[in-house]
Structures are given as C-alpha cells and as structure tokens.
Image (spheres, rainbow, N blue to C red):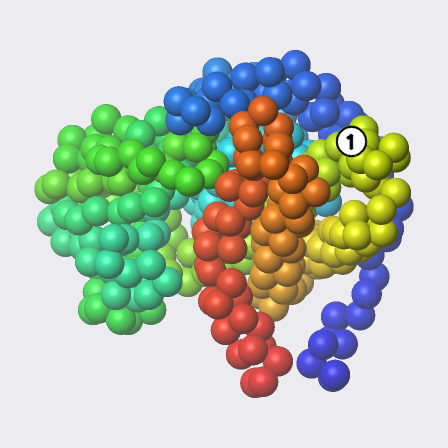
C-alpha cells in the first residue's frame, strides 16, 4: 500500500464558483447549440466547426491557456468540469474539445518557445484555429517507438515523409503538432515534434474514417510527401518529441477520463429519467428492484470515476507527477462509461436499440474511451509499472 499512499488525498470536494459558472454556461450552450443538431451531425458525420468557433468565444477552446495568450487561464478542475458537461450532452463534441485543448494546444503551451506560443496560442485559445495532434501511425498504434514517419535534416529545414492516422481534426485542423522520427527506430530519444500549418506544401489530409461512434468528431489521416518544415517549427530540441508526447498524454488521459465521466453521466441521466416515465404493470419501471439496483450500481460507479478524475486533476494543478493517477482515472472512467451506457440501453429495452432515444448514441460513443489516447491495456501497463517499481 505504500506506493499508493505517496500522494495522500487532499482534494477539496466543494465545487468552486468557477466550476459552477462553467457548468451552467455549458449546459445552457449545449441545450441551444448542440442538442438540437447532434443526431443530424452524427448521421452525416459532420464536424460542426461553427460550434467550436462559438465555444472559443466562451473561453472553452483555451481553458488551460493563460490569459496573456487569450485563454481562460483556468486549471484542471475547471477543465474537467467543462469536458464532462459537454460530453454529458454529446461525446463527439466533448472529444474534439478535449483533443484541441489537451493535445495540440497543451503541447504548444508546455513546450513551445515564447515566439511559438505568441504565434499559435491566441488563435487556438479563441477558436479562430482548430488544433490537431499526430502521434499514431497505421502500423504502430501503441508501439509509437517504431513510427515510420521520418524527418531528414536539410540545412535549416527538415523534409518529412510518412503518414499519421486516427488524427482528430486531420482535415479541418489549421495547425498540427506532429511527432516524427529523426533518429533510430525504437529510440525514445529519436523522435522530434514540429508544429505544421495547414497549407504547408507536401502536407495534406487523407482518408476520413467512417466510425461506429463519436461521428461528429472528425478523424482522418495526415500525409507528408517531401514536406519541408523550417527548424523554427520544432518544439523543444531534436530528439525530445517522444518524451514530450508522454507528458502531454498524462494530461490527455485526464481529458479522456472527463470525457468518459460525461458520457456515463449522460447515459445515466437518460436511463434514470426514462425509468421514472416508463410504466409497466401499473407502476414506473424504476420501482422494480431489477431496474433500481442497476441505477444504484451506475450512480456509485460514476461517483467513483468522478473522484478518480478530479483527484488526478488536483495533482496536475499542483504540478505533481500524475502518470499513475491519470492512468487510473482514464482506465476506470472509460470502462464504467461503457458499462453504464450498456446498462442504459438495457433499461430502455427495445427503445434503447432505436435512434429515437439517446441510449444507443451514448453506447456507441462510450467505446472509444477505452481505446483512444492509450487503450485500457496500456493504462494497466502504466499502473502496474508504477506500483511494482
């Protein structure tokens, strides 16, 4: 138990005024701008860029970005609140909001030079630009050390060839932070990060994925064909890209935990409300123990996921190592999101299998949370290494 007690619990369980304001703002915005259109976006796989522009005006596209760069200047507790509340309405919008904030924007915030931050963060934080982040490749997945996208130095430029896949905002992103290989295969110090703008010669978008869920969140390939990128676009030093990416993903796991928490809350809300409205044998089905116990289990697991997620956010705010805690939060929250969404469909019965009710969408959206930004198996690897070292 000693390894688990290195960071004693110090979370303040009281919701802050900022969290309440963000929660209420997101709920109001979501009811007007997201909920009426989300099934149309889901069916057509439309990425509603205009919605993200509006969220930028509300400060949601740069929640963690300091005010000097046009951001909201908040911490992770406010950030988790925002992602969870958006995802409670629509996981697709929550996923894109999380990817923009925690991956592309956060990478630039953590590792960009003063000039790079001044150039990109105001545009990203206000929603003028959409951000993308590229690590995954077609043949690597979790094995990022064997990436095949290569950058070769040529004077003051690097010439990049290769491809990235499963990239959120691969087509619509205005700038992408991309990690490429500049050294030997398998060398954790052989990869480098670059910020590459849309329109750079040799940089293009490829296939857009046709997905099970999260269909309004754009997922596409990034293709590099003799793409020349100036050394000034490098983030940090050559060879630091993989190490940077792992630090970015610590925060990214908190994002996916918040996303999962929101989807679980939405699925639970829908199931609970339906159970009180749906009558069988002259009473609401919520009065049957079989349904009531399902709801009790769902509520308990959501609360546990909430505590793990805000615990990781609290540590992140304090500048402490969150490698293990973010993995725990992401693992548990994502798995219970799937479980809660599954039980939600069951409570709806036959109607849960139709698109006339929200249960099926939560069910489809939830599964990605156990895969994206590190599968559940990778989270268990991270946790086990931490507790056994």
Residue at image location 68% in from the left, 19% down from the top? 31
Q: Position of residue 162 (x, y in %)?
A: 17, 49
- Along the line of sight, which residue is nearer the eye, 280 or 206? 280
Residue at image location 25% in from the left, 40% down from the top? 222
Residue 379 versus residue 369 in the image, above or below: below
Q: Quadrant of the N terminus?
A: bottom right
Q: Which residue is mark 1?
A: 278
Q: Position of residue 226 (x, y in %)?
A: 11, 42
Residue 148 versus residue 258 in the image, above or below: below
**Residue furthest out toward the front:** 281
Mark 1, secondary structure of its residue: loop
Could you classify mark 1 by the number of other residues whose Cα lies within 10 Å: few (under 14), some (14-19), or many (20 or more)? some
- Along the line of sight, which residue is nearer the eye, 111 or 80? 80
Residue at image location 48% in from the left, 48% down from the top? 368
Residue 230 versus residue 119 in the image, above or below: below
Can residue 101 be seen? no
Residue 246 versus residue 288 in the image, above or below: below
Residue at image location 60% in from the left, 57% down from the top? 335
- Along the line of sight, which residue is nearer the eye, 121 or 83? 83
Q: Quadrant of the C terminus?
A: bottom right
């Amino acid at each position: 138990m000693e390894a688990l007690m290195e960071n004693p619990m110090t979370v303040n369980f009281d919701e802050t005024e900022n969290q309440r304001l963000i929660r209420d703002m997101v709920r109001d915005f979501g009811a007007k701008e997201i909920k009426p259109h989300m099934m149309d976006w889901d069916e057509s796989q439309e990425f509603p860029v205009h919605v993200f522009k509006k969220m930028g005006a509300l400060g949601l596209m740069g929640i963690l970005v300091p005010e000097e760069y046009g951001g909201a200047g908040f911490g992770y507790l406010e950030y988790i609140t925002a992602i969870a509340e958006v995802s409670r309405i629509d996981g697709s919008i929550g996923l894109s909001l999380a990817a923009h904030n925690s991956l592309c924007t956060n990478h630039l915030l953590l590792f960009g030079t003063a000039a790079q931050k001044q150039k990109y963060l105001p545009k990203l934080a206000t929603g003028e630009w959409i951000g993308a982040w590229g690590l995954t490749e077609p043949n690597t997945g979790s094995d990022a050390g064997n990436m095949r996208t290569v950058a070769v130095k040529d004077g003051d430029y690097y010439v990049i060839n290769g491809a990235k896949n499963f990239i959120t905002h691969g087509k619509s992103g205005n700038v992408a932070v991309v990690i490429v290989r500049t050294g030997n295969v398998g060398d954790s110090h052989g990869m480098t990060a670059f910020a590459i703008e849309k329109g750079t010669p040799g940089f293009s978008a490829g296939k857009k994925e046709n997905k099970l869920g999260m269909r309004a969140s754009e997922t596409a390939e990034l293709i590099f064909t003799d793409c020349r990128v100036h050394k000034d676009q490098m983030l940090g030093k050559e060879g630091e890209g993989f190490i940077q990416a792992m630090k970015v993903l610590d925060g990214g796991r908190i994002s996916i935990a918040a996303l999962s928490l929101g989807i679980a809350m939405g699925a639970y809300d829908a199931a609970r409300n339906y159970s009180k409205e749906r009558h069988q044998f002259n009473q609401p089905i919520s009065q049957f123990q079989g349904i009531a116990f399902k709801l009790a289990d769902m509520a308990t697991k959501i609360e546990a996921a909430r505590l793990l997620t805000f615990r990781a956010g609290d540590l992140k705010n304090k500048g402490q190592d969150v490698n293990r805690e973010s993995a725990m939060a992401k693992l548990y929250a994502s798995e219970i999101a799937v479980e809660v969404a599954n039980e939600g469909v069951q409570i709806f019965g036959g109607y849960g299998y139709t698109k006339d009710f929200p249960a099926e969408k939560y069910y489809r959206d939830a599964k990605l949370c156990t895969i994206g930004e590190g599968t559940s198996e990778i989270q268990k690897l991270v946790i086990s290494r931490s507790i056994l070292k």
